[in-house]
Amino acid sequence: MQIFNGNITFGTDVITWIVFIEIPIFIAFMTYIIKQKETMNKNIDLVKINMEKRYRYLNEKINNYKLEVAKKYASVSYLKDVENRLTNHLIRIEEKLDNKLTRLENE
């Protein structure tokens, strides 16, 4: 780089350096960055696909487990029996309350 009359001029060695060294290195670096970005995007897509498969698999397993639990532990006949016992118990409570209410009214 040379300075003549206040103007900065570049010599041929600096321009040659920029043209043959710096620009190709910059282009190679940018190409590398772009390829890395593409590779990362592909890897992210593969991870998303894998996570979706795992989610579907686990969701199916949980649904199957829920169905198994419902079949084994809460049969219809058992639920009807519990309902009948609960209803009978509530009826007895209601009768007791009615009896006490009638006693209070008679007094």
Image (cartoon, grey):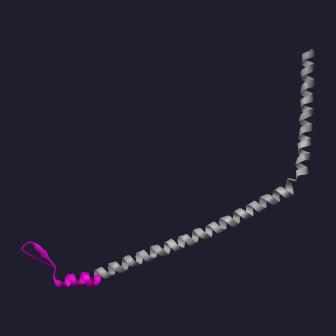
Indicate the quadrant where residue 60 lies: bottom right
Pinpoint residue 25: horizontal percent, then vertical percent. Answer: 33, 81
Q: Is residue 40 above or below residue 66?
A: below
Task: Give me the residue at 88% from left, 51% from top.
Answer: 76
Residue 36's image quarter? Answer: bottom left
Please indicate whether residue 75 sits to the left or right of residue 14 in the image.
right
Position of the N terminus by quadrant:
bottom left
Camera-side residue of 4 and 64? 64
Magenta segment includes 3: yes
State the image quarter where residue 57 is shown.
bottom right
Q: Which residues are magenta?
A: 1-21
Left or right of 105, for residue 51: left
Look at the picture and state if 99 lies above or below 42.
Answer: above
Name the foreground residue: 92 vs 81. Answer: 81
What is the quadrant of the C terminus in the image? top right
**Relative horizontal placement of residue 86, taking residue 52 as reference (left or right):** right
Residue 56 inside the magenta-drawn segment? no
The answer to whether 83 appears left or right of 48 in the picture is right
x, y percent for residue 31:
39, 78
Query: Residue at position x 65%, y 68% from top?
Result: 53
Q: Which residue: 22% across, 84% down?
A: 16
